[in-house]
Image: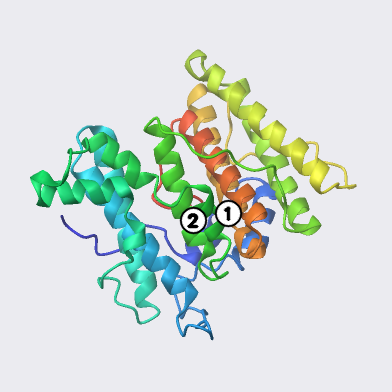
Amino acid sequence: MSEPEQPPRGCTRRSVLLGVGLFPGLALGLLSGVSGCGVRWEGVRQGQPDPSTGTDPGVTALLLELARCQAAESAAASGTGTMSARLARLHAQQRAALLRRLAESGVDGHLEQPSSAITPISRRTADSTANPTAGPTVSPALRLLAAESAGLDLPGRAAVAGVPADDIALVGSLHVQRAVAVHRLGGSLPPWPAPVVASPEEGARLLSSTRAAEYGLAVAAAQADRARAVAASRALASIQTRRRLLASLAPDTSPAPLGHVLPFPVRTPQAAARLGILVSQRLSASTLAGLPRAVGRPDAVATLLGWVHDSELIGLDWGASPPALPGLISP
């Protein structure tokens, strides 16, 4: 298995900042949050060791994610079909990004990873391969689903809130990617909690971004072809529900803008699909940027993860290719 020399193209803080020219609301939301999102691919990490253990909790979280990524990459590589091949490529990109991130901390990510990252099904599969008498062999499809499900249970979701601000956006992005993969593989996730925002200011920021996304998706839905009409209506309804929830969580007395400047003319189904994808990507980025301000708040972190997950599914409905790091790579 070859290892990419570089993380995914565009996976830099600078590239995220350069890609905000969609709508004023989304640009404002992303710009106000990205400076604190903790994804400093260039420069020195700011994490500090835990005084009680002497370990950097950010590094610990990244090592756990690396182990999960490697397990999922191995499972995908042993599978068959287009889906497995695509997931193997995504996890290879994630592995390269994680190794680079760890190297910034002087940590060799090739060292042995925490065994807790291996699911019971993955462990049983490995044992069966090494010792045919260890038990029944698990199918490649089930092994892949188990690997993608790692850390997506309620305790794993809550653990994301304990990741330091420097690293929570990256860990959260990886969490979302696996959640989207589980959805595409036909698996199920624990229900997302009732929405909570970290602060009124954060709620107002998210509301601004969501209003802009609602406008963009409404424009896209109006130009959608028959093949995407149902998905377009579903996506718009989802964002309208989110906007109403945010309005109740963080009442905003300022009037909503009557419209937003589109990045390009939208007069054809092809342009509509392009806009739908762009809106979903920008909304994922703006939402993920709120994670550092939600550290220590499992309910608020889970809310953001759920909304990024839903934004990514909207992008898929419009024909997007699943990214390795949802919300972190500027299209």
Quadrant location of the N terminus in the rendered image: bottom left
Q: Residue at x 75, y 52 (%)?
A: 203
Which residue is at the front of the view, 302 or 95?
302
In which image quadrant can residue 42 be found?
Answer: bottom left
Whether residue 260 is visible, yes or no, is no
> Identity of the amino acid at label 1?
Leu
> Identity of the amino acid at label 2?
Leu
Label 2 sits on a secondary structure element that is loop
Q: Is the C-beta separation of discs 1 and 2 under 8 Å?
A: yes
The residue identified by callout 2 is 328
Q: Residue at x 50, y 20 (%)?
A: 228
Which residue is at the front of the view, 57 or 154?
154
Q: Which mark is residue 288?
A: 1
User: Where is residue 282 shown, x and y percent of the image?
Assistant: 57, 47
Tell me which numbered mark, 1 or 2, is placed earlier along the sequence.
1
Instruction: Classify residue 305 as left or right of residue 98.
Output: right
Q: Residue at x 66, y 52 (%)?
A: 299
